[in-house]
Image (spheres, grey):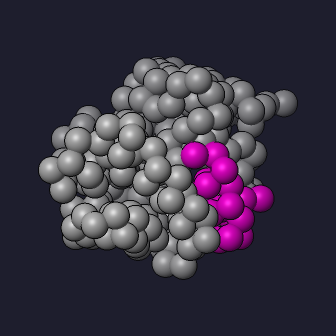
Amino acid sequence: MTNPVLVFDLDGTLVETMGDLTASMNHVLVEAGYEAIEPENVRTMVGAGVKVLLSRGLKANKVDPTPDILDPLLKKFISYYEKHIADHSYPFPEAVEVLTRLKEEGWKLAVCTNKLENLAVPLLKALDMFDMFDAVVGGDTFSKNKPDAMPVYGAIDMADGTREGSIFVGDSRADIQAARNAGLPVIAADFGYTDVPVKELGPDIVFSHYNELEAAIAQIKAEQQPA
């Protein structure tokens, strides 16, 4: 018997990664002679993958992120971040406990992130979270990333789950658009990384702490039941 899947974004939804992302980007920028970016400004730059993050850091320095500038910095960013992937990163409060209960209830769990797969997997392993998930899809696992539906469907299929009844949980514009493109309801965290308040992006439900997530899921499930 296959079950529906709870598909989670990673950065800003499951894990607070801002400390390590900010440190890695600023290490690379300062080493290259550019200005560091304030952490609160970095929060609005995350969500579309490392390449876009670094591009936005360069644009904040009024530098055009052409390939000859961006590509060498990208390699340095990834190299540095790999070595410091969980120095300051941690699961959001009660996330692990809530996911454990949901798994015990029969939900399959998957990660669908725009983070490169070879960064997402080590991060989850470093935080002892990897074994909780039936599938981990990164921004380069498929030929398209969020907001396309392809990685969302891929995460559900890799988890051996059913698309019907599945729910997306994220924190950003890319997450909500990906869920809509995949025809899934979406629950949005308001503590994540976005350039506008997440409620303005039209999710079905917004939650502010993991102790609210199970009730939100139950509400979605109730709304999915035929009248």
Q: Nearer the viewer, residue 59 or 98?
A: 59
Q: How many discs mark residues in the rendered view?
A: 0
Which secondary structure class fits the magenta region best?
Answer: helix
Q: Position of residue 171 (x, y in %)?
A: 37, 49
Quadrant of the image for the N terminus?
A: top right
- Please give the name of the residue rendered at 54% of the width and 79% of the height, measured from the top-left corner: 87
Tell whether 29 sits left or right of 124: left
- Please give the name of the residue rendered at 53% of the width and 53% of the height, measured from the top-left corner: 75
Q: Nearer the viewer, residue 206 or 51?
A: 51
Q: Nearer the viewer, residue 25 or 207?
A: 25
Q: Position of residue 72 (x, y in %)?
A: 46, 50
- Please give the name of the residue rendered at 53% of the width and 65% of the height, measured from the top-left corner: 81
Visible residue check, residue 170: no
Q: Position of residue 119 (x, y in %)?
A: 61, 55
| Residue found at the very far left of the displayed protein | 62
Tell whether 209 sits left or right of 42: right
| Residue found at the very far right of the displayed protein | 1
Visible residue check, residue 193: yes
Q: Is residue 119 magenta?
A: yes
Up/down of 62 relative to 87, above or below: above
- Please give the name of the residue rendered at 39% of the width and 40% of the height, measured from the top-left corner: 68
- Dividing the picture into quarters, in which one does residue 124 lie? bottom right
Q: Position of residue 205 (x, y in %)?
A: 34, 44
Tell whether 101 sits left or right of 171: right
Q: Which residues are magenta?
A: 116-131
Q: Is residue 34 magenta?
A: no
Up/down of 54 relative to 36, above or below: above
